[in-house]
């Protein structure tokens, strides 16, 4: 039976290192608070101009494609996960296709925030297993620094996030001892608004409830302006941090256990868990719940912050590059984020 294997992996983070003390210049915060509550010491910010979610994705993809021993022209499908696209539309998939001079292949954007990469991997896995594609590029990339509220009002969100990208190339394999064993996807939209960025969006209630026929053009123009500008906070990500925390520490271990059960494995069989790098304390709770040893879990949030859709592939790549993941190892991915959506994957490396 065909399975999908990770044939190449790469990551890219911008050069610009932003420490917790750097953030103190803009908001009332401290290195001590950020490290104690999140584990984060520093994060990377992209260049203000010239470096975008797509260009970072291209950097990571270039490494992944080279390591897979192929060229960009061999890629036959692109899946791009991000919540911080270059444009509201079109998505980053086509921008990457253009930048890397790829063929006129399909390009799909995934909007699943922190679980975006694992969702993207799952979609790619299905296409490989059915034999539809042979070289799928899966990218997670984020440029958060462009859209955060750096005032004290936004401090509980802005200190967490960082920029970067990760990418993998998936190829088919018939080797029974290698490849993606299973993926598991979930959502619960009940709390969609507690981790969200409302604008730009079509959510304004007066738009929905009021028939446009009652207004002339000038009034409609004014309504649009006020909709966009009245509540400036809605232009930045909003998060009820403690509520997100409580749900994440339940759902992440749950999806890992689901994946293990589906494959008749136990937590002791995991060689490396790559948890979404949301917050070091969340990862530690997950580790505790699953009774995993320190050497079974990889975290790098200390250096890069939470890079949302890029966090899992960046951590996976760094763990592999530093020799912490070896051929034949059982690797588990687990992610949780806005939506809420959460997802897990088990991979025989
Ligand atoms: N610097 C200093 N103080 C801050 C701060 C900052 N950057 N951000 C918030 N505070 C303050 C709050 O205003 C609050 O002050 P008060 O007690 O005077 O009201 C206090 O610190 C505690 O805030 P709270 O939000 O309860 O802290 P917390 O321990 O829950 O930590 C998060 C906040 C955001 C770090 C934490 O809830 C979290 O990590 N949640 C999950 C976030 C996440 O993973 N999101 C990504 C999606 S998966």
Image (tube, rainbow, N blue to C red):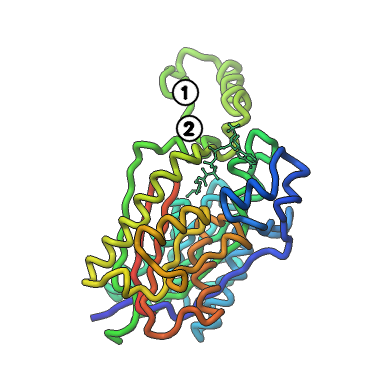
Identity of the residue drawn at 69% across and 50% down: 31
If the picture is divided into quarters, which one holds ligand 1? top right
Residue at mark 2: 202
The answer for how far apart the CA atoms under marks 1 and 2 are is: 8 Å
Looking at the picture, does residue 307 appear above or below residue 139?
Answer: above
- Specify few, some or many for label 1: CA neighbours under 10 Å numbering under 14, 14-19, or 20 or more: some
Residue pointed to by mark 1: 207
Q: Position of residue 178 (x, y in %)?
A: 33, 82
Q: Is residue 105 left or right of residue 322?
A: left
Task: State which quadrant residue 211 falls in.
Answer: top left
Which tag, 1 or 2, sits closer to the chain's start? 2
Q: Is residue 91 visible?
A: no
Q: Position of residue 343 (x, y in %)?
A: 36, 57
Q: Is residue 288 left or right of residue 183?
A: right
In the foreground, 164 or 335: 335
| Secondary structure at numbered mark 2 | loop
Image coordinates for residue 126, horizontal then vertical, percent: 30, 68
* Cβ of mark 2 under 8 A from ligand 1: no
Q: Name the outermost residue toward the top.
A: 214
Q: Looking at the image, which residue is at 35% across and 51% down?
A: 251
The residue drawn where x is 64% and y is 46% is: 33
Residue 81 x/y as whole percent: 48, 58
Within the image, what quadrant is residue 296 found in?
bottom left
Element under disc 1: helix
Which residue is at the front of the view, 103 or 345?
A: 345
Q: Are marks 1 and 2 in contact (CB under 8 Å)?
A: yes
Queried on whether the Cβ of the residue with tag 1 lies below 8 angstroms from ligand 1, the answer reads no
345 vs 248: above or below: below
Q: Is residue 279 something one can see in this rendering?
A: yes
Q: Is residue 127 left or right of residue 211?
A: left
The quarter of the displayed image where residue 57 is located: bottom right
- Quarter of the image with the C terminus is bottom left
């Amino acid at each position: 039976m065909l399975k999908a294997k990770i044939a190449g992996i790469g990551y890219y983070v911008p050069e610009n290192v932003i420490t917790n003390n750097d953030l103190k210049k803009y908001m009332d915060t401290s290195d001590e608070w950020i490290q104690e509550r999140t584990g984060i010491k520093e994060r990377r910010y992209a260049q203000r101009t010239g470096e975008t979610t797509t260009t970072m994705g291209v950097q990571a993809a270039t490494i992944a494609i080279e390591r897979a021993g192929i060229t960009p022209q061999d890629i036959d499908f692109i899946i791009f996960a991000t919540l911080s696209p270059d444009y509201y539309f079109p998505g980053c998939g086509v921008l990457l296709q253009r930048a890397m001079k790829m063929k006129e292949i399909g390009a799909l954007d995934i909007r699943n925030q922190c679980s975006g990469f694992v969702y993207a991997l799952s979609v790619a896995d299905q296409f490989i297993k059915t034999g539809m594609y042979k070289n799928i590029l899966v990218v997670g990339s984020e440029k958060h620094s462009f859209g955060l509220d750096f005032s004290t009002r936004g401090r509980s969100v802005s200190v967490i996030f960082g920029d970067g990208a990760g990418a993998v190339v998936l190829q088919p394999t018939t080797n029974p001892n290698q490849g993606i064993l299973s993926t598991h996807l979930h959502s619960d939209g009940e709390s969609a608004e507690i981790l969200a960025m409302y604008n730009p969006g079509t959510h304004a209630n007066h738009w929905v409830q009021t028939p446009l026929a009652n207004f002339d053009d000038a009034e409609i123009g004014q309504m649009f302006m006020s909709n966009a500008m009245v509540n400036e906070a809605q232009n930045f990500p909003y998060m009820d941090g403690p509520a997100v925390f409580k749900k994440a520490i339940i759902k992440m271990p749950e999806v890992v256990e689901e994946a293990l059960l589906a494959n008749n494995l136990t937590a002791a069989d995991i060689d490396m868990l790559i948890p979404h790098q949301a917050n070091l304390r969340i990862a530690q709770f997950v580790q505790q719940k699953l009774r995993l040893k320190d050497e079974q879990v990889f975290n790098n949030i200390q250096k890069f912050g939470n890079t949302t859709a890029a966090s899992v592939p960046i951590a996976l790549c760094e763990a592999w590059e530093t020799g912490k993941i070896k051929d034949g190892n059982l690797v588990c991915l687990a992610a949780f984020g806005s939506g809420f959506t959460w997802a897990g994957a088990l991979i025989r490396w």
